[in-house]
Image (cartoon, rainbow, N blue to C red):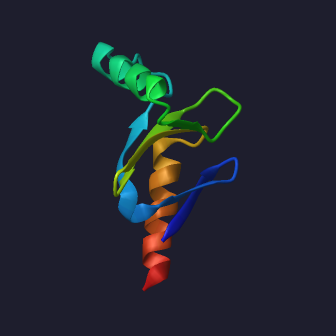
Amino acid sequence: MICHVGAGTLIIDKDVVGIFDLDGEVTTATTAAFLREADKKKKTVAATTDIPRAFVLTSGGKKEEVIFTRLSTAAVAKRIEAGVEGEF
């Protein structure tokens, strides 16, 4: 199922590895290093022009992306769950 995460960016629910919170939390050094490396490798996508509240890590085949979204982790999870439930 396809899920919209903002700014016309669509993801496939089966490709989601994780949804990670950026809202009001201090990013750990490990997470910051991971995000810097992903940006350096041009694997980041901004699904918002606002300050992102979360990022979604996807892996579809050989393509891995970090997608920044203004949606909360709960909102992204809810959209994915609604899509999966609607599929049956």
Number of numbered discs on residues: 0
Query: Which residue is nearer to you in this view: 82 or 8?
Result: 8
31 left or right, relative to 68: left
Q: Residue furthest bottom?
A: 88
Residue displayed at 49% across by 22% down: 24
Query: Which residue is nearer to you in this view: 3 or 22?
Result: 3
Query: Which residue is nearer to you in this view: 5 or 9?
Result: 9
Residue displayed at 39% across by 37% down: 20
Give the answer, above or below, for where 68 lies relative to 31: below
Which corner quadrant of the image does residue 50 belong to? top right
Which quadrant would the C terminus be assigned to in this image? bottom left
Task: Locate residue 22, reporting x and y percent.
Answer: 47, 28
Task: Locate residue 28, reporting x and y percent.
Answer: 32, 17
Give the answer, above or below, for where 24 lies relative to 56: above
Residue displayed at 66% across by 37% down: 48
Query: Which residue is nearer to you in this view: 38 or 46?
Result: 38
Task: Locate residue 23, reporting x and y percent.
Answer: 50, 28
Residue displayed at 52% across by 41% down: 72
Task: Locate residue 42, reporting x and y percent.
Answer: 50, 31
8 left or right, relative to 77: right
Which corner quadrant of the image does residue 37 belong to? top left
Q: Residue furthest left?
A: 30
